[in-house]
């Protein structure tokens, strides 16, 4: 019995069903080739080794934590599917990471989430870079290309900027501790701004800048810090914590020399023009003033101002006169009042009312001084003084003593 032939589509879909249901999700390691990030956002590439190659696709809805490049060895996880239109199988990737760094990426994401929750990345903690720093501190390897690029950029753009280089271990054992120590050393050196960083490399090479020790040192530093680690596509924890992230070390050097020598010369030219214009305006004003004196306008204005001042002086004089007279009248009234009171309290004041004062030896005789027969006294009245001799003395009878 002859078997009925299948169409190409039927056979392709049969193979598709067998492969997709039979293999399921797998992880594949290989070298990236023909990588293309399409304008649609999807990623197309091929994984290959020495014997075979495998077409791959990763849709834009999937998350990539790094930028794949041709020649990079990666581990891709996904489902083997068949692209029926071309009749070829491919790997539909759901996740991908560089080979051998899976644990590092997990640690990176965990530390990133923890520091974000603790506020290490908050914009409110970011400090602005100084407009024109005088001392810049650089913490990087003294033998790498990064330090040469930064120094040449600073020398070209703003040669008067003083550079304090702190040679630093930027990868391998002890690098994180040395970077943290370098930050403290540059802070004590009283630099105005600081650059920490290095050139590009693998995630293992850059890992010192992804440690809690370095992140804490950056966060605690009182000096604004620029993080310039790797290339533009590289991102480290220090980039998130720092006040400013530079795409490259050269870009960091450009940030600290935002005002170049050319900018300063231009500012000097602007200041010179402003001074020239100010002097010119002043000369024109003085010329106008001299001309106004020549035709009498200025003299009239001076006379007007003098008259205004004279009127104000007259007003002040009248006000002071009124105030002074009022004060003198008040004081005279007080003097009259107190004079009347003093007159009424004078010891001889009762004489005017018909009373007399008894004196002995020219002094008033007090109530506690007794007289005896034969004493010589004087009687002072308002119009005369009489000399008398006491004939006898008897006690007075007070109302309380009367029966």
Image: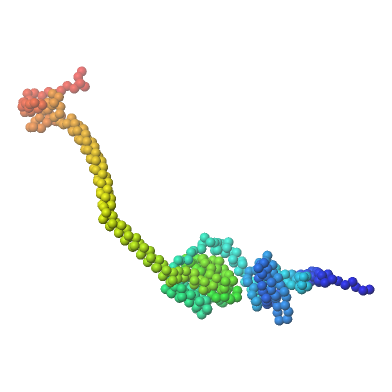
Q: Is residue 29 left or right of residue 114?
A: right
Q: Quadrant of residue 78?
A: bottom right
Quadrant of the image containing the N terminus: bottom right
Q: Is residue 32 left or right of residue 375?
A: right
Looking at the image, is 30 positioned above or below residue 356?
below
Q: Position of residue 61 (x, y in %)?
A: 68, 65
Q: Is residue 334 left or right of residue 382?
A: right
Q: Quadrant of residue 401?
A: top left
Q: Quadrant of residue 20?
A: bottom right
Depth check, front residue: 149 or 296: 296
Quadrant of the image containing the C terminus: top left
> Image point 51% across, 63% down: which residue?
126
Depth check, front residue: 225 or 340: 225
Looking at the image, is 314 positioned above or below residue 375?
below
> Image point 54% across, 63% down: which residue?
120
Would you say residue 388 is visible in this rendering? Answer: yes
Q: Position of residue 128 (x, y in %)?
A: 48, 64
Would you say residue 214 is visible in this rendering? Answer: no
Depth check, front residue: 369 or 162: 162
Q: Position of residue 370 (x, y in %)?
A: 12, 29
């Amino acid at each position: 019995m002859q078997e009925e032939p299948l169409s190409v589509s039927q056979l392709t879909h049969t193979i598709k069903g067998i492969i997709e249901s039979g293999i399921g999700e797998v992880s594949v390691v290989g070298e990236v080739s023909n990588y293309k990030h399409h304008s649609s956002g999807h990623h197309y590439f091929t994984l290959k080794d020495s014997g075979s190659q495998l077409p791959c696709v990763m849709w834009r809805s999937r998350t990539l934590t790094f930028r794949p490049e041709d020649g990079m060895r990666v581990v891709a996880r996904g489902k083997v599917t068949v692209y029926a239109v071309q009749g070829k199988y491919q790997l539909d990737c759901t996740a991908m990471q560089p080979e051998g760094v899976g644990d590092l990426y997990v640690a990176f994401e965990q530390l990133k989430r923890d520091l974000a929750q603790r506020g290490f990345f908050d914009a409110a903690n970011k400090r602005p870079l100084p407009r024109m720093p005088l001392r810049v501190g650089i913490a990087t390897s003294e033998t790498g290309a990064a330090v040469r690029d930064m120094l040449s950029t600073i020398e070209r753009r703003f040669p008067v900027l003083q550079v304090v280089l702190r040679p630093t271990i930027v990868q391998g054992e002890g690098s994180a501790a040395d970077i943290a120590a370098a930050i403290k050393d540059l802070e004590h050196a009283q630099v105005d701004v600081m650059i920490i960083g290095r050139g590009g490399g693998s995630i293992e090479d850059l890992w010192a800048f992804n440690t809690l020790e370095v992140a804490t040192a950056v966060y605690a530093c009182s000096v604004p810090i620029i993080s310039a680690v790797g290339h533009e596509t590289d991102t480290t924890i220090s980039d998130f914590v720092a006040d400013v992230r530079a795409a490259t070390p050269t870009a960091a050097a450009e940030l600290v020399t935002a005002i170049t020598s050319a900018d300063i010369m231009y500012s000097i030219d602007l200041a010179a023009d402003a001074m020239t214009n100010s002097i010119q305006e002043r000369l024109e004003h003085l010329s106008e003033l001299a001309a106004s004196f020549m035709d009498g306008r200025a003299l009239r204005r001076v006379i007007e101002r003098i008259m205004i001042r004279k009127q104000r002086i007259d007003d002040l004089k009248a006000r002071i006169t009124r105030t002074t007279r009022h004060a003198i009248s008040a004081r005279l009234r007080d003097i009259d009042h107190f004079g009347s009171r003093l007159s009424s309290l004078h010891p001889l004041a009762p004489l005017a009312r018909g009373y007399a004062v008894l004196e002995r030896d020219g002094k008033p005789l007090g109530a506690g001084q007794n007289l005896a027969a034969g004493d010589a006294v004087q009687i002072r009245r308002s119009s005369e003084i009489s000399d008398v001799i006491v004939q006898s003395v008897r006690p007075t009878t007070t109302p309380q003593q009367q029966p």
